[in-house]
Image: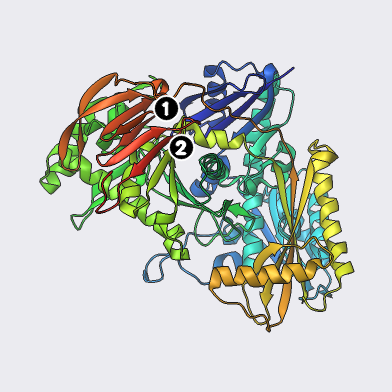
């Protein structure tokens, strides 16, 4: 009987693999270099290197960057947009905002579909869903034939107010499919039946352009796994923190944007729970970027206001993660004003940092850590051998000479800039919301997270840093912790005080029927289905709304109204109990439970002595320190050491700076206690 659960997370630099045996509770990891031109090859390489017999695999999870990278690079098939006459430029006009309010010269990148490929037809639905002007079917057929002559087979249909009445959009879709057999047509009312044209149009357009690319990738990978003996559905992690099957990914490919990022946040939440922290910040530092997530009161923040690029919203629920260009491969350079910068440009996996000896000549954070001896010369379990002399040469030529600094001083400056950038990102997700970072723990993971975590914590006054086992593959582990999940919504505007509860329940039941059909199609047993109702509300006259759980007692609407008042007070520091409350939107989270791994505590006696396997001079705080080097796999539970120290592992290195104390807990997490200003470690 298959008893392996495998998770593969494809990152920009490395592809990580976790293998969990549900019978023995054994957990092992491996990683291979990513293959940017063919991401599927890295997945298959990881399966091969992990010596995985696919016939023994019960569940195969995959976090992928295919959708994210396609939106960033805009390498997707040519597509067309059909919209209501007069609304051709909604996705170009956008909402009038700018990423940087004070930069008059910065332009938002153009829409995913060019103006020459956007077309209009005569039709009109009003705000209440009444058909004011029926679809001109003759005009629609002529347009469909024109698109066929142009070779357009990927088409988005986005009509005004279609969320209130889907008839015209659906009829346009039928005509397109009749005239262009095999066309990939998406409608905005199917993808996102919500108000606000720009948000709905852009989400539908992003979904449309990703369709062929994601479908091809998922089908090919699914076929390869099946050919190797895997008998179940491939489970793909989506941005909302759940997974979906290839069948659903074909219909909603845009949900795979930010796929791997969500896995890291889920893993950070799990680690925080293990260690007894309700408040934690996830610092996932990989080869290209750093992803910052926030766990507050034991919950991850979820947002519907996000996008891969500014000005191009994707309005599906997503775990809120702030991504900045600070990774192991981020390039250090001196700008035209003579200031030292770090990122967002990255050396990536090819050519990679200078020390990779693959043609890279620019210094990176990896080069700086190697030059300071914080990093050894073997990476990814010996898969890569690093050349320290190349790092020193790049740092001296590109940074040291320009700033008149020694190699060590220049390398330390590079890392200080990177750490300051990450600390600023943590401030954005915490202090900006009225949360004090000193009340949080820092979960440092990713291939480079444990190298920088303690320094970032010192910068922010965070008292504790947790480094999980195998931090370089923690995001892949997060894939093992998710369920199949769908998020459905519909507009429902009414005063909360006089809303018809029977009608409200009827609308929820229609969402539940759709969710049940989706989960049944994905092979989820009825007893494994969990449905969670939510409702968005606002004070009368407000534009923004807040989502809360729908009550489950005798008076569910009254319960929801009270929850709304409480949430409004928590987020905005005031509530208005006498102000009428409006219902704005209904939400449903449909979860299909999947088996979860059970991680056993580390079974080794406490308080055993552990000796360093080597020592080397490491640069900390402006001077070289004779530093012990430990092998993490030999450290017993309860072992405690005072920095400076280096702890090596197969996939990463943990740095314990001077003034910090590290210990190993029962889950084999490294807990680093950071001395605060004026305190002794």
| Residue drawn where x is 54% and y is 28% of the image | 601
N-term-proximal mark, 2 vs 1: 2
Image coordinates of residue 215 in percent, x first then y, are 67, 38
Callout 2: helix, strand or loop?
loop
Residue indicated by mark 1: 651
Image coordinates of residue 71 in percent, x first then y, are 54, 49
Residue indicated by mark 2: 12
Image coordinates of residue 470 in percent, x first then y, are 46, 29
What's the distance in space between the residues labelled 2 and 1, CA to CA?
16 Å
Residue 195 visible to the viewer:
no
106 to the left or right of 251: left
Residue 114's quadrant in the figure?
A: bottom right
Residue 606 visible to the viewer:
yes
350 up-or-down from 452: above or below? above
154 up-or-down from 29: above or below? below
Q: Quadrant of the N terminus?
A: top right
**In the image shown, does 665 or 621 lie closer to the viewer?**
665
Q: Which mark is residue 523?
A: none
Disc 2 crowd rating (10 Å Cα; few below 14, some 14-19, many 20+) is many
Disc 1 crowd rating (10 Å Cα; few below 14, some 14-19, many 20+) is many
Q: Quadrant of the C terminus?
A: top left
């Amino acid at each position: 009987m298959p008893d392996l659960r495998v998770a593969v997370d494809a990152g920009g630099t490395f592809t990580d693999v976790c293998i969990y045996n549900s019978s023995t509770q054994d957990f092992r990891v491996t990683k291979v270099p990513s293959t940017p031109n063919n991401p599927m090859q890295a997945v298959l390489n990881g399966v091969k290197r992990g010596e995985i017999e696919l016939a023994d695999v019960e569940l195969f999870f995959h976090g992928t960057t295919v959708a994210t990278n396609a939106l960033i690079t805009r390498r997707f098939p040519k597509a067309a947009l059909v919209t209501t006459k007069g609304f051709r430029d909604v996705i170009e006009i956008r909402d009038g905002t700018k990423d940087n309010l004070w930069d008059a010269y910065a332009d938002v990148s153009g829409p995913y579909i060019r103006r020459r490929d956007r077309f209009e037809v005569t039709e009109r639905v009003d705000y209440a869903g009444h058909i004011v002007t029926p679809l001109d079917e003759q005009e629609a057929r002529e347009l469909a034939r024109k698109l066929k002559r142009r070779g357009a087979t990927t088409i988005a249909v986005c009509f005004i107010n279609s969320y209130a009445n889907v008839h015209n959009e659906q009829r346009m879709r039928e005509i397109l499919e009749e005239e262009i057999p095999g066309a990939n047509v998406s409608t905005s009312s199917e993808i996102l039946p919500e108000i606000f044209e720009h948000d709905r149009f852009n989400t539908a357009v992003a979904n449309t352009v990703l369709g062929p690319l994601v479908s091809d990738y998922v089908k090919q990978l699914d076929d390869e796994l099946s050919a190797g003996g895997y008998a179940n559905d491939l489970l793909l992690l989506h941005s909302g923190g759940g997974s979906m099957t290839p069948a659903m990914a074909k219909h909603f490919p845009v949900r795979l944007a930010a796929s791997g990022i969500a896995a890291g946040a889920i893993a950070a939440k799990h680690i925080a729970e293990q260690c007894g922290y309700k408040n934690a910040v996830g610092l996932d530092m990989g080869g290209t970027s750093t992803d910052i997530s926030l766990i507050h009161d034991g919950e991850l923040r979820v947002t519907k206001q996000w996008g891969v690029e500014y000005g191009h919203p994707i309005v599906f629920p997503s775990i809120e993660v702030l991504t900045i260009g600070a990774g192991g491969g981020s390039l250090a350079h001196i700008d035209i004003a003579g200031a030292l910068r770090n990122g967002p440009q990255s050396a990536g996996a090819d050519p990679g940092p200078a020390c990779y000896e693959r043609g890279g000549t620019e210094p990176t954070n990896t080069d700086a850590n190697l030059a300071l001896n914080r990093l050894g010369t073997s990476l990814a379990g010996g898969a890569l051998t690093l050349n320290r002399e190349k790092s020193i040469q790049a740092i001296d030529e590109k940074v040291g000479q320009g700033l008149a600094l020694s190699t060590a001083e220049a390398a330390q400056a590079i890392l200080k800039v990177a750490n300051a950038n990450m600390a600023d990102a943590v401030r954005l997700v915490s202090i900006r919301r009225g949360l004090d970072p000193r009340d949080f723990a820092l979960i440092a993971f990713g291939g480079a997270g444990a190298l920088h975590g303690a320094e970032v914590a010192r910068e922010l006054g965070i008292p504790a840093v947790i480094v999980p086992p195998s931090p370089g593959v923690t995001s892949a582990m997060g894939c093992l912790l998710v369920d199949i999940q769908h998020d459905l919504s519909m507009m429902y505007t009414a005063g909360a005080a006089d809303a018809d509860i029977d009608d409200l329940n009827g609308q929820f039941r229609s969402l539940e029927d759709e969710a049940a059909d989706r989960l049944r199609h994905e092979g989820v047993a009825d007893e494994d289905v969990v449905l969670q109702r939510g409702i968005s509300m606002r004070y009368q006259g407000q534009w923004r709304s807040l989502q809360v759980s729908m009550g489950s007692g005798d008076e569910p609407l009254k319960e929801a109204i009270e929850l709304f008042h409480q949430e409004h007070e928590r987020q905005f520091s005031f509530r208005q109990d006498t102000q009428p409350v409006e219902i704005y939107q209904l939400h449903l989270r449909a979860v299909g439970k999947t088996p979860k791994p059970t991680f056993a505590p580390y079974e080794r006696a406490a308080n055993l002595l552990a000796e360093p396997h080597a020592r080397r001079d490491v640069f900390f705080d402006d001077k070289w320190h004779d530093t012990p080097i430990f092998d993490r796999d030999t450290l017993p539970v309860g072992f405690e050491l005072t920095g400076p120290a280096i702890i090596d592992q197969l996939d990463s290195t943990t740095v314990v700076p001077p003034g910090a104390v590290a210990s190993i807990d029962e889950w084999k997490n490294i807990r680093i206690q950071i001395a605060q200003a004026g305190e002794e470690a």
